[in-house]
């Protein structure tokens, strides 16, 4: 029996899984999984130990796919820098894992591989042209064109959170101004709330113990007008960016994942309305759907990465 | 001997060419060419006659590639609508030419095929990840990823002129607000001049017989401050959009064509400076280069379309 192992490294958790290879099933069954906190000291060694936890007792490991935070260069297998895993600076992750485990390794940006996972096994199943955005502490993205992951010259493509939505808008985590991430990620919602609180003395947001994206979503569900308006405004910015991305990519499906995308109907409906209103032609209209794979998107995307590369 | 014929249909002229097929040369030699004004009555029949003008006296025509104004669906071979060729509404161009000439036909959007031509034989030669924008009466675009043309679900991808640069900006030809085309195409420069003329009583733009993009470029070269500022402002908008496109596509080369791109250093230098200033990381930095193929880009791109499809 042959297996493929995959891993997904985040700032808080690193996960690993074992799948059969190749899998006759539409979605490969997850035969084993493991999860550990991501340590600040030597996360690469911890990742190698985690992969050993899902190593099969017998049989062959055909390959390993790793979803890692970026920016990273998938051709060279190097993480350039990772804000949530500060130990990784020009980290040759692929070579280190290959040296330790003596199995070929492929590396991909976590949001890119989540896109590939959703396109193959989740909300984009059956479609060749898929956009994926994850709205969370940041905004990550991935693009699947003609069934293939869009990588670009250095493998840095698909940074859909870093496109300008309002050139006069707030500063983004990357240092530029008015990017989508600076207007719809969790911290952007918090900043919008801070700017508006004085004008809404009745808002329940004055009383939450900590102003977070989650707290804004919760009080929006309780009927708070300010919270609902903040989510709607973020949705309009998102819809504008999605319309632009439709003119650029003409996707069949746009998949939204991440905590902010699950914050209720205010953001989602405003995004949907603005997207449709800002398309040049109705032919561009994509399906706008929620992600389906949750925390497994990266693990399954790292599996799909081997399928796609084998076919190509 | 076998040949490939190609054609490029614009609002004013339609061109056709004959090439050897396949061509051992890096850039296929143009064996014959013809050009006629695009008639308002039955342009499809005129295009078929034009292709007959470059038909070989003996030998076989392997196929025909046609660059046509869009939006069009290259999979179905249908021009959906063409503002510059009003007779074409849901025109089944591929089927009509195939019926008349009994040779397989492939159809592509003119800016998409110009991108493919430049990527294969022009300013993008040797690169797998190429963006092309033509700045003229409108702004068209095309994207080459991993050597392949990006088409999308309905073949409508690559409309790089229709991404939002300033949501409060002027209305675009497509009816939406603040698109790149509405800020940097020729008519956008004219509108910007009209808005500013009263503040620049000394400007030579008061004296030009007709206010056009070309006239603005000419008086900019003569030292006119207003004309230079208009071109610089358009360049800044262009640079912002190009930085966003780098985060999306991570191209090696961005190629600029069209009359507005040749309007002197003001637009070009401002675009270049803004592009570099607005990149998240230096790794994204592309080469920014002028188009090389001029009016032959579409004819050569329609040739490359057959090469790419044959290989795929």
Image: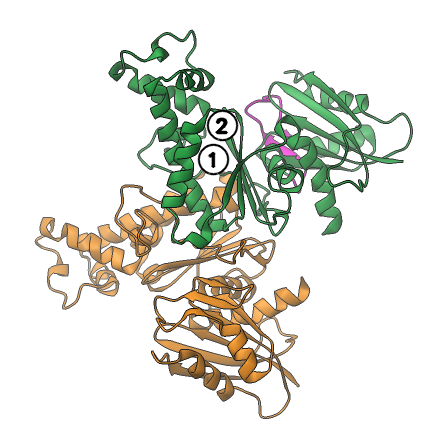
Chain colours: A orange, B green
Tell whether position B81 is magenta: yes
Q: Residue at the spot x=12%, y=56% of the render?
A: A203
Q: Residue furthest left?
A: A201
Residue A122 visible in the picture: no
- Is residue B36 among what the camera can see? yes
Few, some or many C-alpha atoms within 10 Å of disc 2 (few <14, some 14-19, many ≥20)? Answer: many
Which chain letter goes with mark 2?
B
Residues A220 and A163: in front is A163
Residue A188 falls left or right of residue B157:
left
SS of the residue under disc 1: loop
Q: Is residue A44 above or below residue A225?
A: below
Quadrant, the N terminus of chain B:
top right
> Around disc 1, counting alpha carbons within 10 Å, would you say few (fewer than 14), some (14 to 19), or many (20 or more)?
many
Residue drawn at point x = 50 percent, y = 51 percent = B250
Q: Main secondary structure of the magenta part?
A: loop
| Magenta stretch bounds | B74-90
Q: Position of residue A297 (x, y in %)?
A: 47, 69
Q: Quadrant of residue A135?
A: bottom left
Q: Do the CB atoms of the residues marked 1 and 2 lie less than 8 Å apart?
A: yes
> Residue B161 shows which numbered tag?
1
Query: Residue A165 is drawn in which quadrant?
Result: top left
């Amino acid at each position: 029996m042959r297996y493929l192992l995959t891993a997904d490294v985040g700032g808080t958790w690193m996960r690993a899984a074992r799948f059969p290879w190749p899998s006759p099933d539409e979605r490969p069954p997850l035969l084993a999984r493991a999860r550990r906190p991501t340590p600040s000291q030597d996360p690469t060694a911890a990742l190698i130990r985690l992969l050993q936890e899902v190593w099969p007792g017998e049989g062959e490991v055909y390959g390993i796919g790793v979803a890692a935070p970026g920016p990273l260069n998938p051709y060279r297998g190097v993480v350039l820098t990772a804000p949530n895993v500060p130990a990784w600076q020009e980290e040759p992750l692929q070579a280190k894992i290959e040296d330790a485990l003596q199995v070929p390794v492929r590396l991909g940006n976590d949001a890119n591989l989540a896109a590939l996972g959703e396109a193959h096994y989740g909300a984009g199943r059956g479609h060749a042209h898929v956009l994926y955005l994850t709205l969370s502490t940041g905004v990550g993205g991935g693009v699947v064109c003609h069934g293939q992951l869009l990588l670009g010259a250095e493998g840095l493509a698909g940074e859909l959170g870093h496109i300008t939505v309002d050139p006069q808008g707030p500063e983004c985590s990357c240092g530029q101004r008015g990017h989508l991430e600076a207007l719809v990620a969790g911290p952007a919602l918090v900043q919008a709330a801070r700017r508006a609180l004085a004008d809404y003395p009745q808002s329940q947001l004055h009383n939450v113990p900590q102003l977070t994206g989650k707290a804004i979503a919760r009080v929006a569900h309780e009927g708070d007008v300010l919270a609902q308006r903040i989510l709607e405004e973020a949705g309009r910015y998102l819809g504008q960016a999605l319309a632009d991305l439709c003119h650029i990519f003409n996707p069949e499906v746009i998949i939204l994942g991440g905590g902010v995308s699950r914050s209720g109907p205010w953001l989602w409906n405003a995004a949907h309305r603005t997207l449709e209103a800002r398309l040049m032609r109705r032919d561009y209209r994509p399906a706008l759907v929620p992600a389906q794979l949750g925390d497994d998107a990266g693990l399954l995307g790292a599996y799909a990465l081997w399928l796609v590369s084998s076919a190509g």
